[in-house]
């Protein structure tokens, strides 16, 4: 109900912190360092994934999706988890900071969900002979995408900031439970049909392949944090701009009342 | 005595528009206060804020001793608010509407019965669907629902609108009776002659702030530039 | 609390009884959906018979969506939401009352659709205990989730388009569970279906608790 409390502003990752404690731009030493790590890591991952590691005996070059697909999917679920946590803390403490964390991680989560779906389909085309099968993981990831799109559709609606934040927080709080419910029901249903699944545990992974895969997880994790910080700061700055606009509107309205 | 309404620098937003841009107002128990001002001055918003229906976005506000920020629900269940919309179910009859709203507000069926009789709704109109009532008849039903709640604070937004002469007199009489019994009334109306007969005080809103607060009758206050 | 639940549910059911939107519009729509499925899936090739449980539950979901939108259309029509907020009714009681009314309407629609598939799709209904348990638990689950997401969308200008997008993915577990349970009941192997009934009951309980807890913050809107 109130403007961002000071405790929120202090919590904000404050690089070029303004007088009010919030970020003034989206770049900072921390994000630049993270960005450099992401770029270096991505280059290393591409080099190892595309050239450094051998083809698989059975899957051929397809095995290279192993270095980005599980990573994208895992990151997507982390984003979803963070949205639920942020929404819960917002409902509990009415902290604008956590509301914006929920928003930012939902958007980035949707990005990684899309990436996981695309790489999954690309794997499926040669492996299963079709872009899409009703595999339990693929299906529940698609449902996660739809749930995230619903959340983001609500967030994009114009209206009172606090009202919208509260509605989004309820949706966000239910996001992870819904994902789990959908996933459980899809898994129980599809396991009855014994379909193949994009399962990497059966593949023999040599030392370098395993390293590349783990490097992939690390790179995606840092990428997520990097994007999250930037997206969060954009949202924070938008909030501050809105407050400035409201303050100006109040001054204009008072002038209208007292003598014009 | 503790004021019934106590606003200090109250700000209320409609979207991003500051309908109230810093209102200071104190109303004592038993007072009947006329709120006047041009269209768009924030009269309706002020009444909605005092009813606990709109969040307070700046300043301080207490109504009936409860903080508008923390205890808006306590405020809501103790006030009687009549807005532009009547909040009735079109599909239900007059009787069923009043019975539901009385029960929902913790009043009993006898209260609903008395209010219905007071507004002449217990005769031919009793079992008519609200959808088939005229605008004035609907407002009579809404007023009866408000009276049945026996609120401590009456917030009436254009209570005379669409009513016939006799019903306007009835509204005025009920307001005076309620105030005599200790209730407080905040009234927004353009019927200044009527308000003169009731209100001891006129608050003028312009541009979302109070520009004058006087103990003169509304007809005179409106002539003050 | 309990009195308020009954008051709200009674009010909603009375409105539905008086307006007869359910009987005059949603019921015929339910039958229409069944007929449209028959047009799309050739009845002579046995596709319809095989797909009956799934088509049945899709029809229930679509009708449920209409019933939920209707339940909130009557509240926003003349600002009754404000009046409800001004009344002393606890948000949790309001949620449970509206859920109860929607669930009751869904039960009637589900019964109508059962007759519909028996007549139009020549489905041989069997395994009645499982069938009934599934209908009840699925109806409560749909009503609970629908009422929670319904009030969320109710105040928005885009409610007609947003509600299906928000609600239908959430109801996917109900569609999956109820269809599997129906398949088991119709195939004469109810033992395979009872675990799915348990799943539907869990879903219903989760949403009854979540709705009762979260209705308050959603009503606090401007």
Image (cartoon, coloured by chain):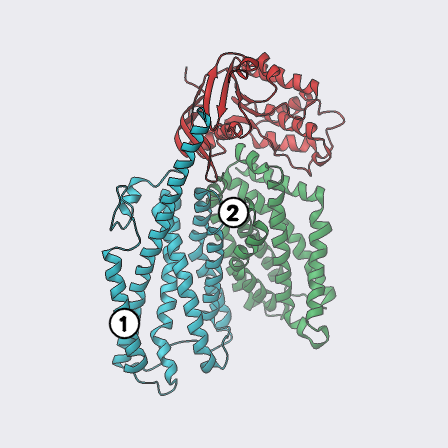
Chain colours: A cyan, B red, C green
- The residue that mark 2 highlights is C152
Query: Could you give the CA–CA distance between mark 1 and mark 2, rounded to whole angstroms?
Result: 42 Å
Task: Pinpoint residue C29: horizontal percent, then vertical percent.
Answer: 70, 57
Q: Which mark is residue A215?
A: 1
Q: Which mark is residue A122?
A: none
Label 2 crowd (10 A; few <14 / some 14-19 / many >=20): many
Can residue B174 be seen from the camera position used here? Answer: yes
Q: Secondary structure at mark 1?
A: helix
Task: Pinpoint residue B59: horizontal percent, then vertical percent.
Answer: 38, 29
Who is closer to the viewer here, C133 or C72?
C72
Q: Quadrant of residue B118?
A: top right
Lateral position of residue A186 relative to residue A100, left or right: right
Chain containing mark 2 = C
Give above or below for A44 relative to B82: below
Q: Quadrant of residue A222?
A: bottom left
Give above or below for C154 relative to B49: below
Residue closest to the far right = B124
Residue found at x 35% / y 79%: A64
The lab-note entry on whether marks 1 and 2 share a chain reads no
Residue closest to the far bottom = A57
Residue found at x 41% / y 38%: A246
> Is there CB contact under 8 Å for labels 1 and 2?
no
């Amino acid at each position: 109900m109130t403007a961002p409390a000071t405790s929120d502003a202090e919590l904000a990752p404050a690089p070029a912190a303004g007088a009010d404690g919030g970020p003034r731009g989206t770049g900072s030493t921390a994000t630049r360092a993270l960005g450099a790590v992401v770029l270096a890591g991505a280059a290393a991952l591409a080099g190892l994934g595309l050239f450094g590691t051998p083809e698989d005996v059975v899957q051929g070059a397809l095995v290279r999706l192993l270095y980005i697909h599980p990573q994208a999917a895992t990151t997507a679920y982390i984003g979803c988890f963070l949205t639920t946590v942020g929404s819960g803390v917002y409902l509990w403490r009415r902290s604008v900071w956590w509301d914006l964390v929920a928003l930012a991680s939902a958007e980035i989560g949707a990005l990684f969900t899309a990436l996981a779906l695309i790489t999954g389909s690309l794997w499926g085309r040669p492996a299963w002979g079709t872009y899409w099968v009703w595999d339990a993981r693929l299906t529940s990831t698609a449902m996660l995408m739809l749930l995230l799109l619903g959340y983001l559709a609500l967030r994009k609606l114009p209206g009172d900031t606090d009202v919208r934040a509260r509605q989004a927080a309820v949706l966000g709080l239910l996001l992870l439970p819904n994902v789990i419910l959908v996933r459980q029901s899809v898994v129980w249903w599809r396991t009855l049909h014994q379909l193949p699944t994009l399962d990497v545990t059966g593949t023999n992974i040599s030392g370098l392949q395993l390293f590349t895969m783990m490097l992939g997880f690390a790179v995606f994790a840092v990428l997520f944090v990097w994007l999250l910080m930037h997206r969060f700061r954009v949202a924070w700055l938008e909030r501050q701009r809105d407050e400035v606009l409201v303050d100006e509107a109040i001054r204009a309205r008072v002038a209208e009342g007292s003598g014009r | 005595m503790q004021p019934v309404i106590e606003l200090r620098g109250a700000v209320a937003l409609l979207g991003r528009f500051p309908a109230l841009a810093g209102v200071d107002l104190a109303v004592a128990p038993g007072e009947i206060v006329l709120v006047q001002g041009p269209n768009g001055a924030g009269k309706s918003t002020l009444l909605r804020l005092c009813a606990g229906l709109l969040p307070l976005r700046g300043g301080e506000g207490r109504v009936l001793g409860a903080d508008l920020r923390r205890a808006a629900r306590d405020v809501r269940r103790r006030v009687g608010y009549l807005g532009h919309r009547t909040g009735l179910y079109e599909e239900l009859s007059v009787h069923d509407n009043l019975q539901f709203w009385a029960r929902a507000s913790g009043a009993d069926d006898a209260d609903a019965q008395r209010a219905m009789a007071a507004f002449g709704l217990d005769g031919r109109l009793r079992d008519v669907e609200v959808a088939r009532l005229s605008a004035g008849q609907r407002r009579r039903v809404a007023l009866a629902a408000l009276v049945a709640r026996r609120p401590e604070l009456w917030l009436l937004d254009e209570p005379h609108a669409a009513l016939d002469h006799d019903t306007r007199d009835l509204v005025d009489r009920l307001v005076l009776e309620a105030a005599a019994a200790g209730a407080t009334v905040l009234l927004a109306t353009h019927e200044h002659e009527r308000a003169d007969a009731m209100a001891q005080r006129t608050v003028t809103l312009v541009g979302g702030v109070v520009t004058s607060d006087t103990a003169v009758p509304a007809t005179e206050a409106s002539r003050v530039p | 609390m309990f009195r308020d639940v009954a008051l709200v549910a009674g009010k909603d059911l009375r409105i539905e009884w008086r307006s007869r939107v359910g009987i005059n519009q949603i019921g015929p729509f339910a039958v229409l959906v069944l007929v449209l499925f028959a047009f799309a899936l050739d009845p002579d090739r046995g596709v319809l018979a095989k797909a009956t449980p799934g088509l049945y539950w899709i029809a229930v979901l679509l009708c449920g969506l209409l019933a939920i939108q209707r339940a909130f259309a009557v509240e926003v029509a003349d600002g009754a939401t404000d009046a409800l907020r001004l009344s002393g009714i606890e948000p949790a009681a309001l949620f449970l009352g509206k859920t109860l009314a929607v669930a009751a309407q869904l039960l009637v629609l589900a019964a109508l659709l059962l007759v519909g598939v028996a007549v139009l799709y020549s489905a041989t209904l069997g395994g009645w205990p499982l069938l009934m348990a599934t209908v009840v638990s699925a109806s409560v689950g749909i009503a609970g989730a629908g009422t929670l997401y319904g009030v969320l969308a109710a105040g928005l200008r885009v409610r007609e388009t947003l509600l299906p997008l928000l609600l239908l993915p959430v109801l996917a577990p109900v569609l999956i569970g109820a269809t599997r349970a129906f398949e088991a009941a119709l195939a004469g192997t109810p033992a395979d279906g009872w675990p799915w009934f348990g799943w539907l009951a869990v879903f219903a309980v989760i949403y009854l608790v979540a709705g009762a807890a979260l209705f308050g913050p959603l009503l606090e809107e401007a």
